Structures are given as C-alpha cells and as structure tokens.
C-alpha cells in the first residue's frame, strides 16, 4: 500500500503569513506561543515516555498536531478532505479531531483563555478584575435537522427559520473578552428563559447592556441599560430614540465579539458532527480562541 504524503505542514505554512492566518486564525507568534501550552497539555494528557511503545504517531510533530486541529476549527472541512490533506484515513481524522480538541481545550484553559461556564465561576473571576461594562446576548448556530420529531420541534428556531442550538454570552465591553459561555441549549428557547435557567448573577454595581429580548429579566445589584420598546399604538419620544441609539452603539461590541468567535467556521457553518457534547466543546474552543487572539493583540486594557 502506498503511504500518503502529508501535504500540509507547519514548517512550510509559517513561511506564508496570510495563509497561516486564513487556515488557523493565528499569526506565527501567536501560534508558537500557543504551541508551548499545547505541548504541555499533550504531555500531561497522553504522557511523553517513548519507552511505552505503541504505534508511531501519524502526525509526528507537535506543531503539525496543533495545525491540524486549528485548521479544522477555522475552516471546518469535511473529514475526508482534512484526512487527505494530512495523509490520513477518514477514521483516523475523526479520532484525532476529538483527541486534539481535548488537548487544545486544556491548553487554552491553562493559559486563562477559557470563558467561565458557571455563574459562580464568572462572578469570582469578575470580582478579581478591573470593573468594566458588560454586555449579554444569545447566539444561535445552525445544526443538521434532527431525525426525531421532538428534536425537530425543540431545535427549530422561528427567528432563524432553521434548526439551531443556542448559547448565552456575557462579554467585557472594554477588553472584548468572553467572560461567560452558557450551556448549549436547543434553539427554540428564548434568551430570557436561558438566563432564568442559568441563574445569571453579576457583581454588585455592574453596568449591563442588553437588547429588548431580555425584557422582564432582573439581575440583582446591576444597572441595566436596555432599549425601550415602542408602546402599542404609540411612538417613542425623540429622547427615547436617542437613548436607544446610544445603548445600541455600545451594545454592538457584543456583536463584534460574536463575529470574532465565528471566525471559526465550525460554529458558523451548519454543524455536522454527531458525537454527544462536541457541539458545546466546539463553541467553547471558538470562544477560548477569540479570547486568546484578543489578549495577544489588544493589551491596552
């Protein structure tokens, strides 16, 4: 049997800065800094003792392993495609996607880039940081149409007119970091219901910006800035319209952060993976990579 030749390798790709960013979302300096944490996480997860034996790894260098998983998250190719580009079979590619994702998650968490997943964890972190304005929003991702009728009804989003999953996000409006990533829910759930179920709480005195979808949801101890809805059969005053524009101008930063997260096409395109829980891990990795990029590029805050 003829052995496939690896087409993609970091040693060649690093000589093409634009291609590296297009394929991984990272610059060379960012890639190599993350590689240090990825290597540590790999050794802690899998062990690094060569005397243990076993089959030689298909992707031999640590840089190419990191390239493999970043390329997958950023471009989201079919597994047959990424298998061909890295000289693998499709089952090997499938196995390595999940293995490398777990290592990357651990590396990003070790670097402090993983968003909080629980409210208590978020409030503890925020209490140790400089106070700043926060924004909250929900974001939906398209998924393949579930096979069972119950799943179809639960995941059908009237807003997007397709089947989706949804997460709540709380973001810093100054440092543009994702502070909190809620659990992955079916797309039919309303944003306010997600907050009620997740028991969203924030440190005393926080200023929170949000849209009108959260009407009626209370966050104790916070100052909430939310656009006013036009009364039924009436109109908003000029002052109310000006205030709504002011709030929207600040809150739009959350939309920019979501766009940064969705640079990883795995959370932008229709999600195809079927392994349980991987839809949530993919969103966590995309948020963590956004936090990593913004921490590397915007150090002023």
Image (tube, rainbow, N blue to C red):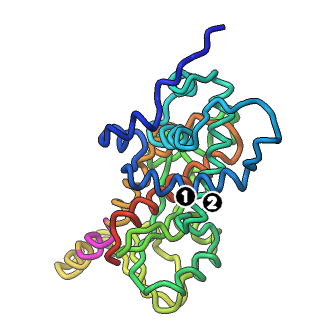
Q: Please report the residue visible at 38 percent of the width from the left and 49 percent of the height from the top.
A: 28
Q: What stretch is highlighted in magenta?
A: 246-252
Labels 1 and 2: the sequence-earlier one: 1
Residue 247 location, quadrant: bottom left
On the image, numbered disc 2 is attached to which residue?
Answer: 183
Quarter holding the N terminus is top right
Kindly check if marks 1 and 2 are in contact, taking CB atoms under 8 A apart as contact: yes
On the image, numbered disc 1 is attached to which residue?
Answer: 167
Left or right: residue 264 versus residue 3 is: left
Residue 288 in the image: above or below residue 207: above
Left or right: residue 151 versus residue 264 is: right
- For the residue labelled by badge 2, is the local secondary structure a helix, a strand or a loop? loop
Residue 136 position within the rendered picture, expressed as x and y whole percent measured from the top left: 45, 70
As drawn, the residue found furthest toward the top would be 1
Question: How many marks overall?
Answer: 2
Label 1 crowding class (10 Å Cα cut-off): few <14, some 14-19, many 20+?
many
Residue 173 position within the rendered picture, expressed as x and y whole percent measured from the top left: 37, 74
Residue 180 position within the rendered picture, expressed as x and y whole percent measured from the top left: 54, 69
Q: How far apart are marks 1 and 2 (CA)?
A: 6 Å
- For the residue labelled by badge 1, is the local secondary structure a helix, a strand or a loop? strand
């Amino acid at each position: 049997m003829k052995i496939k030749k690896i087409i993609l390798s970091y040693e060649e790709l690093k000589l093409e800065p634009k291609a590296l960013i297009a394929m991984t979302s990272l610059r060379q300096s960012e890639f190599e800094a993350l590689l240090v944490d990825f290597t540590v996480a790999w050794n802690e997860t899998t062990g690094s003792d060569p005397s243990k034996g076993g089959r030689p790894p298909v992707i031999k260098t640590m840089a190419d392993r990191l390239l493999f998983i970043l390329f997958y998250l950023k471009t989201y190719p079919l597994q047959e495609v990424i298998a061909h580009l890295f000289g693998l079979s499709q089952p090997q590619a499938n196995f390595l996607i999940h293995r490398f994702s777990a290592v990357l998650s651990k590396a990003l968490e070790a670097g402090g880039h993983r968003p909080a997943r629980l409210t208590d964890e978020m409030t503890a972190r925020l209490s140790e940081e400089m106070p700043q304005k926060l924004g909250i929003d929900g974001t939906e991702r398209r998924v393949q149409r579930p096979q069972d009728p119950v799943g179809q009804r639960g995941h059908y989003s009237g807003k997007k007119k397709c089947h989706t999953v949804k997460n709540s996000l709380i973001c810093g409006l100054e440092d543009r970091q994702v502070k909190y990533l809620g659990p992955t829910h079916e797309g039919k759930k309303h944003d306010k219901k997600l907050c009620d179920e997740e028991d969203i709480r924030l440190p005393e005195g926080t200023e929170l910006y949000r849209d009108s979808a959260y009407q009626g949801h209370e966050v104790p101890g916070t100052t909430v800035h939310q656009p006013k809805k036009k009364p039924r059969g009436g109109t908003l005053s000029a002052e109310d319209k000006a205030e709504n524009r002011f709030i929207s101008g600040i809150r739009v930063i959350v939309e920019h952060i979501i766009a940064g997260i969705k640079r990883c096409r795995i959370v932008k395109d229709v999600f195809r993976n079927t392994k349980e829980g991987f839809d949530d891990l993919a969103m966590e990795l995309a948020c963590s990579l956004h936090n990593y990029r913004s921490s590397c590029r915007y150090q002023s805050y």
